[in-house]
Image: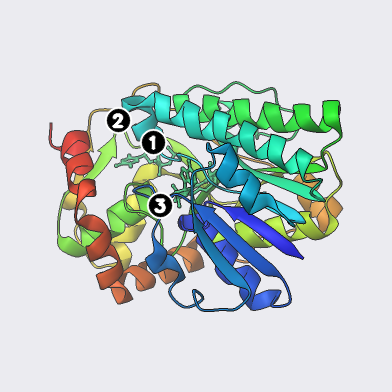
């Protein structure tokens, strides 16, 4: 099989590329990524010379590049996106461009090239926000109710993917996954930011009252869910994917501090995020009953191995922290 992976130099996309080449070494992977601030070829150093791997630096919004990359492709796995909510509040237009227009261009090209599967990676954030005091979880039937420019752009892309299935018969599947964490995550997201600040003895900026809840999934478990959907998922279907680990932000931060033997006085409550979604929680009922998915990592084991990775890979994050990221960090946290 020839797979076109978009966004394969990012956090989750690179985990997919590494995993797929290790476990499906008869397949070929073309990785199309335009290396935004979040794309990092250091995530792929071990596999860049594999004969069945090819990297194309290109933008999914550029139809010519996409059509060239799509030649001979059997399966598209579409990760490329602007992915950080805080940046979508600062600059929504990039999210509309990449997440909506980029997906539309890929869909049209996939249809023209008659791919056998277009798998779209989406998020539970398209469903909106749940009350803290309820036990309700999102599932495949939950109406879309996105509340940030990021989630609205992902919801729009999901709708386009569904439209290409219903109108043109493009063989699609969609996964809506909860918050990922693990090695190689860019340190603008909660968990890597807090690990790196704690290692450096810097304040840990917790938004609002710190009681917002997320359902955390270890990236490798997300990749295994995608593998199951590619191998056994039904065309036209959506699958929700969760980590079965709902935790309040401040408890995530306290856990990181305790594993690193750092004091809780490093916690710094800062101004809340605009429109901050209170709680996400997602049901694995469909993917567990239909495809046999069960996350292998609980939060306890996943966070320990994630922290160990950041401790052992200091050169990776020191390089990432240089350059433009400093400007973003200052504008987000040092106003
Ligand atoms: P990321 O920001 O780490 O990586 C995104 C990648 O896409 C980068 O390599 C970037 O260079 C590339 N990219 C961005 N714009 C592009 C463009 N116009 N053309 C080509 N490449 C482009 O993101 P991530 O956390 O790995 O997320 C990957 C996907 O998973 C996204 O679609 C995201 O919405 C979804 N998702 C993420 C999470 C999470 O917790 N991180 C949870 C659920 C779903
Ligand atoms: P994030 O990792 O940005 O993921 P998302 O917003 O997509 O869920 O944030 C996870 C939670 O952590 C979210 O409730 C916002 C909160 N948060 C902080 O409290 N401080 C921070 O510095 C960041 C980046 C996030």
Q: Left or right: 192 with respect to 81?
A: left
Q: Left or right: 286 with respect to 275?
A: right
Precedes in sequence: disc 1 or disc 3: 3
Which residue carries the number 3 mark? Answer: 35
Figure quadrant of the N terminus: bottom right
The circle on residue 200 is: none
Q: Residue 111 occupies which quadrant of the picture?
A: top right
Q: Position of residue 78 (x, y in %)?
A: 62, 47
Q: CA distance from mark 2 to mark 1?
A: 8 Å
Q: Nearer the viewer, mark 3 or mark 2?
A: 3
Q: Secondary structure at mark 1?
A: loop
The circle on residue 208 is: 2
Q: Secondary structure at mark 3?
A: loop
Q: Residue 83 occupies which quadrant of the picture?
A: top left
Q: Residue at x 45, y 39 (%)?
A: 82
Q: Residue at x 19, y 58 (%)?
A: 263
Q: Nearer the viewer, mark 1 or mark 3?
A: 3
Q: How many marks?
A: 3
């Amino acid at each position: 099989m020839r797979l076109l992976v978009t966004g394969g130099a990012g956090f989750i996309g690179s985990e997919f590329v590494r995993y797929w080449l290790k476990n499906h070494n008869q397949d070929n992977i073309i990785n199309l990524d335009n290396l935004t601030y979040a794309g990092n070829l250091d995530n792929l150093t071990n596999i860049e010379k594999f004969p069945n791997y090819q990297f194309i630096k290109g933008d999914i919004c550029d139809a010519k590049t996409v059509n060239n990359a799509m030649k001979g492709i059997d399966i598209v796995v579409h990760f490329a996106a602007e992915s950080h909510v805080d940046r979508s509040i600062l600059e929504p237009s990039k999210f509309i461009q990449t997440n909506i227009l980029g997906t539309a261009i890929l869909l049209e090209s996939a249809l023209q090239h008659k791919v056998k599967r277009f798998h779209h990676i989406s998020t539970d954030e398209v469903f909106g926000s749940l009350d803290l005091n309820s036990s309700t979880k999102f599932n495949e039937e939950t109406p879309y109710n996105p509340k940030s420019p990021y989630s609205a752009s992902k919801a729009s892309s999901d709708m386009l993917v569904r439209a290409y299935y219903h109108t043109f018969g493009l063989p699609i599947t969609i996964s809506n996954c909860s918050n990922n964490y693990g090695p190689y995550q860019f340190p603008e997201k909660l968990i890597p930011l807090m690990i790196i600040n704690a290692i450096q003895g810097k304040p840990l900026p917790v938004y609002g009252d710190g009681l917002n809840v997320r359902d955390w999934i270890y990236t490798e478990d997300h990749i295994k869910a995608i593998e199951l959907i590619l191998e056994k998922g039904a065309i036209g279907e959506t699958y929700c994917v969760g980590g079965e680990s709902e935790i309040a932000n401040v408890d995530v931060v306290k856990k990181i501090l305790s594993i690193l033997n750092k004091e809780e006085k490093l916690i710094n409550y800062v101004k809340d995020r605009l429109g901050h979604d209170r709680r996400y929680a997602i049901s694995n009922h469909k993917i567990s009953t239909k495809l046999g998915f069960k996350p292998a990592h609980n939060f306890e084991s996943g966070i320990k191995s994630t922290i160990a990775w950041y401790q052992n890979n200091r050169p990776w994050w020191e390089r990432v922290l240089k350059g433009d990221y400093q400007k973003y960090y200052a504008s987000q946290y040092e106003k």
